[in-house]
Amino acid sequence: MTERGAKEVLISAVAGDGTIIETIYRPQTAETAFVIAREGKIEVVPDYRIENVVVVPVRPGNNLIKHRALVLPSEPVDYGDCPQLIAEIEQYVRRYVFLSDEALSLCAVYILLSWLYDAFNELPYLRFRGDYGTGKTRALLVIGSLCYKAFFASGASTVSPIFHTLDTFKGTLVFDEADFRFTDEKAELVKILNNGNVKGFPVLRTQVTPKKEFDPRAFSIFGPKIVGMRSSYQDRALESRFLTIEMAPGRATGIPINLPNIQDEEALKLRNKLLMYRLRTRCSIKLDAALADDSLEPRLNQILLPLLSVAPSQVLRDAISNIARGFQAGIIEERSSSTEGQLLAALVEILADPDRNPSVADLTNSFAVEHGKDYDRPIANRWVSGILRRLGLALYKSNGIVVLVPGQEEKIAALCRRYGIGKPKPRDEKNQGAREIGTN
């Protein structure tokens, strides 16, 4: 073999023949090595040959490893079976973080998912939300310490090292104080959350070479992410990527105020068992589309299926599904109170009354009477028409009047389901012609 300095650095890989390569770090001797799982055998080696290339693990003096900003296992350790591993994870988390039973189940399964994430194409994010002093940071430290190649950062971090670390190590981003506002750099960090839950969507960034030339580069940022926040993002699409655990104020009896040193040791022991879990499970795990819940929205099903596919029992799947249903109920309630939801409710009320003329003017007047005081702008027909178009309802001009295109009952009913609004009742046959909505 060639000298170590001439070899290529590798963090981890899953080869086409099923060989799994993982980097470990031994804190007692400050050494890194590879764990190789191939054809049912597991061995620890200082380097490894892949075809004509010799690869070596990252240096043990790597700054991220040295300062524990990145945590790795130290050796593969047998864990018994998956239910036993889940029970150990839950016991560990319960010692240091106060969570409901369902939230604890979600966290335990998310930890498992982080060790198998590269077997899936879409992932959810896990979020702990609450005011300061509610245990968000504690939860990030305790749960993040068990995740696959966990990388710890905060809102005070700059953009470049986060992109480089995610691209290089391809692990779990554990991000505290993720409430970003107003600055361009924070907007760059939000791109990690916008693009990082779907495989195949790298972020393109331009680097300057030593010759002062601009060199565009794609950064892979796909992977699990656990964040702590005080509030929510205004972008609803970004919000839909999160499974959120609300952190309540107060401290449960028995939860230590400060993390003891033994927590690090406990986390390392569990990471070692989780490494063995990955080595045994990674090449056999698959997305189980049959676990989709027809009562949930497509996006929610999309991010839930990897979790449900990893969960080893129906009890855990039920706990995750219950959280998801509560999450969906909150989304629908928020939608119903939005401008679009309020206007849709007013439209449904008009369509349900055969004695009312369903014109945009009538709709505008109804909306203004009910909600006008909540807006710092005049409620005008043109504004209402714009919202109807934004809802996907087609309008056209007939005899100088802008009307709703007939035959959109199914679309309106679908919007009602999405916004949690009672769908319109059929009008009397003699009033069918009045279903067009006109603007004077």
Image: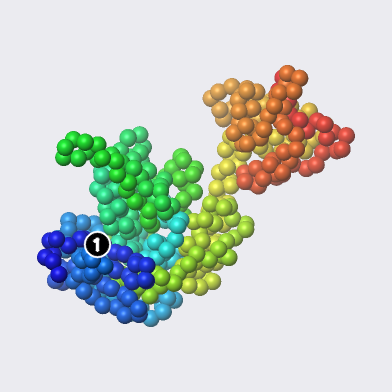
Taking 266 as reference, is 248 left or right? right
Q: Residue at left 53%, top 52%?
A: 299
Taking 413 as reference, is 46 left or right? left
Q: Residue at left 65%, top 42%?
A: 415
Q: Residue 325 versus residue 436: which sits nearer the camera?
A: 436
Q: Residue 323 versus residue 208: which sits nearer the camera?
A: 208
**Residue at the front extreme, as displayed:** 52
Q: What is the x, y in percent for residue 184?
A: 32, 35
Q: What is the x, y in percent for residue 93?
A: 36, 67
Q: Quadrant location of the N terminus? A: bottom left
Q: Amino acid at mark 1?
A: Leu
Q: What is the x, y in percent for residue 288?
A: 53, 66
Q: Which residue is mark 1?
A: 10
Assign a secondary structure to mark 1: loop
Q: Is residue 40 above or below residue 395?
A: below
Coloring scheme used: rainbow
Q: Quadrant location of the C terminus? A: top right
Q: Is residue 84 above or below residue 234?
A: below
**Residue at the right extreme, as displayed:** 430
Q: Is residue 380 above or below residue 65?
A: above
Q: What is the x, y in percent for residue 345?
A: 67, 38
Q: Residue 7 versus residue 116: which sits nearer the camera?
A: 7
Whether residue 315 is visible here, answered yes or no, is yes
Quarter of image, res 426: top right
Quarter of image, res 261: bottom left
Q: Residues within 10 Å of mark 1 (few under 14, many from 20)?
A: some
Q: Residue at left 29%, top 44%?
A: 217
Q: Residue 216 versus residue 65: which sits nearer the camera?
A: 216
Q: Residue at left 31%, top 75%?
A: 37
Whether residue 421 is visible here, answered yes or no, is no
